[in-house]
Amino acid sequence: MHKKIINSIATIMLTVGALAGCSTASSGSKGIQATGNNVKIGVNMELSGGAGGYGNQQKQGIQLAVDEINQHGGIKVGNKKKKIKLIIKDNKTATSTSASVAAQLTNNDKVTSIVGPATTNAGTAQTPNITKAAVPAVSPSATDPGFTMQKNGKVQPYVFRACYQNNFQGATAAKFTYNNLNARKVAVFYDNSTDYGTGLAKSFKHAFKGKVVASQAFSAGDKDFNAVLTSFKSKNVDAIYVPGYYSEVGLIIKQARQAGIKVPIIGTDGMADPKLAQIAGAQNASNIYYTTPFSISQASKSATARKFISAYQKRYHQKAPTFSALAYDSVYIIKEAIEKEKSADSTKIAAGLAKIKNYDGVTGSITIDKHHNATKPIAIESLKNGKVANSIAIK
Amino acid sequence: MQTFWQQLINGLSLGSIYALLALGYTMVYGIIKLINFAHGDIYMLGAFWGYYSINLWHFNFLEALLSSMIVGAASGVIIEYFAYRPLRQAPRITALITAIGVSFFLENGMSYLFGSTARDFPQVIKQVNYNFGGVLISNIQILILATAAILMVALQFIIKKTKMGTAMRAVSVDADAAELVGISLNKTISFTFAIGSALAGAAGVLIGLYYNSIDPLMGMTPGIKAFVAAVVGGIGSVPGATIGGFLIGLLETLVQSVGLSAYKDAAVYLVLIVILLILPAGILGKNIKEKV
Amino acid sequence: MKANFKYNIIWLSLMVVGFILMNTLILVGIIDSFLENMLVVIGINIILALGLNLVVGFSGQFSLGHAGFMAIGAYATAIITSEHPNTLNFYLSIIVGIIIAIIAAIIVGVPTLRLHGDYLAIATMGAAEIIRIIINNLKITNGPSGMFNIPKFASWPVVYVMVCITTIIIANFVHSRAGRAIKSVREDEIAAESLGIKTTFWKLAAFVLGAATAAVAGSLDASYLQTITPNNFGIMESISILIIVVLGGIGSLTGTFVAAIVLGVIDTALQSFGPLRMVIYSLALILIMVFKPTGLLGRYEISLPRIFARKKEAKS
């Protein structure tokens, strides 16, 4: 019996060895040339599954941007205006599906650029396929520092993002907490189910000059944080840092205030969403600070942001969330890249994206650095009674 | 000491939520031996019903609670009729997969219709904190605790004292024999689903009100935890589900209060496995002797 | 034995023909990288579901923890090949994954396999979740960020060969003395025990073999997708493997193949439906189960001897 199995295995191995030699696919693609009268942009997005809520907000931002561009005649490629054709696919917040979606978009739909995915993991899963096809992708919200990097420390040629990477935001929050809020003893309460929460918690702890007296975790979908908050209360902390998304952070704020914890709560752009104050309850959402690129109060100074906010309000009848703003900007920087390079070929778009400098986006003036991260000014907003009370630009 | 009492309150209030959900699981499992994966999603339906009935028709709390119990019961009976009844003679694992399918359907259908972002639940009861020497208890926590206790007693009464309850117990012991003595199988099972799902509907409104945040996937995690609670307590037993719920709630609070929050779910599962190894049918479950 | 040998040779040549066919299609360009992606994912699912079918279908032990063992294989490969990327290490990492998975399966299986039915299911689910949570909190696994930029060694021929090897091993196991022993445990544990079959041993054997194949699938998954995260290996993954097994027919290896292919194609085809995707998928699942409760193929198996026997009958 065993001999037979070994025999069979050996035979197959030999066959494969013989065949594998000729099965190597041609690598080193020259990218996808733009054809026809449209610019095809693919969307690989978390429309269902765990991050579905965030993915759908981004989809709204993308659709708003594309419809706006098309109303104005489209993207100027060379001296001809071409309309955008959007191809939206769901990756159901799964890595294997994200890879498959990327393959489908580049192979079958022949898109010359991709917006998405929202999460780092789905993003890294699509990287091999888009690199093979030489099609650039801009993720609105993949924040892991390594997302745009290869293993050998070189930058991924076709991976870009429109958001900060974690280290920048965490360090800013740490400085602000120490200098502006004068907090010396802080507790960190982070989202342990994503790279976003853990990454930010790590960079905050690294950069914070005071003492981190407690560090606890929650996972997406948790609703009850009373036990951890009670333990923070007994430690008399000066401030709490909560890197995570608004769904959970809103509840943390509510439960903290109801448990009588009045210290400042500092968060990240994941909670910069009008939903936060609704979930926390307006009366609880005071003494709250978060780092964000996109600030509604600062928008009065920027015409682009003002236009976006009113267009969003008109179309979706709600205040614009940060995720939609980031996705909206992702589409526009692709447009910018195409117009600068005068070509909608995929490799040209990639070259153009790498050269984006001081682009006036909704989330601030965007420059793509050598590691394909978006650098833009960061602001810290504070909430009082659920409303943005103050916005402090941090240099 | 103050912290200890506060954590005890935290644990009990979390436990009462698991207990409330575990009651429904235990009833359905007791009668047709099916892990009703869709139970957590009926709880979600109840919460959404509460959201819309309060926001659109301005129901007060009691109206919202009672109407969501009716909606929960109705959806439970409908699901049983279309998805589980045709499979009553099929292998149990098939019914389980169908239950998972129903759960996926409800979660994704609701996401499609109402969007998957979290929304805030209308605060029909204003939360008031009572302070007992530094230990805070809110009126809603007391409400949930009381509701869980009342429902448990009521259920125990229905099962032990009423005719339908006797029928339910008969069906759970031997469905064929029960049918022979004139018990309508379909009616009894529908009734069980109605009661179990009504509990889930009520839990939806209560928990929605308590946490002030609902979304289409809200039933997933508590659903699994509540099922674990039901198994720990001895599935099929009403007091068992309550004990299991409180046990899991207290355990999670304990693990988090000592600073191991990253491992809180692992601790729950570890305790589950250990309890099952010592008491294979849970704490209050009946251990059926194997017959040759 | 000689007859068996003949059939094994036929199967083997069928596999080689399949390989050549696919290779040609890829070279000609009919199978592009999108289809190849789909086929590889289906292949990995086949390995997973075959292993689970052995546990659930043939030995009758209801396990909901398959994804935990898959995680072990995936992380073994990711960690080892990220450190020292070469082909030898890739195969070595598969073996390491198998060994750790076997040890984990024994640790989990020895106590829990005394449980029955749904209790076993929930206990194995708990065990798999514990594995996932530990991985989620370890430093070497890079926590919830998962690992990416994993070197790619699992091209489609590797996956294809692994599918073939897994099929051969499991099919031979099922048709051997061991297979008859585990099936007797499924049918009636007490009767089997009274006939002198060591039921605990055989249950554990099936469980361990299932875990080992899951680890292989995990290794391939990590190496092919080049990205893994602990969230890939949650309860939902275990459930989706179970769905393949039940949909194909519990205790039918052929059914597992059919179901993995059907579900893989449905899932890929639904990508363009956006948020409606999972709604349609779940409805399809409910309908198939309600109208075909024993799965697509029940316990039917393709069997060469039977096909040949039928032909002979037809001739005479």
Image (cartoon, rainbow, N blue to C red):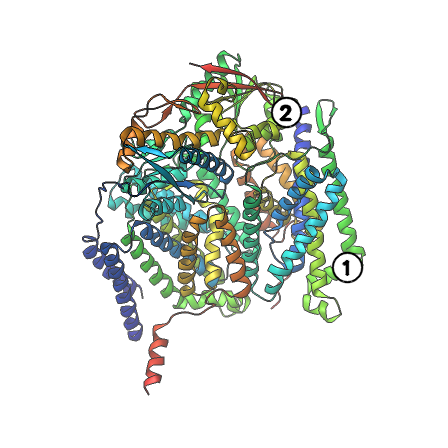
Residue shown at the point (46%, 46%) measured from the top left = C274
Relative image position of residue C239 (x, y in whole percent): 49, 52
From the viewer's perspective, is residue B111 above or below residue B259? below
The secondary structure type at the circle numbered 2 is loop
Q: Quadrant of residue B254?
A: top right
Residue B164 falls left or right of residue A15? right
Q: Quadrant of residue A371?
A: top left
Cα distance, mark 1 to mark 2?
48 Å
Q: Chain of mark 1?
A: B
Relative image position of residue A122 (x, y in whole percent): 40, 40
Q: Nearer the viewer, residue B52 or A167?
A: B52
Q: Tell me the amino acid under the disc marked 2.
A: Ala
Residue pointed to by mark 1: B164
Q: Quadrant of the C terminus of chain A?
A: top left
From the viewer's perspective, is residue A322 above or below residue A212? below
From the viewer's perspective, is residue C85 above or below residue A7? above
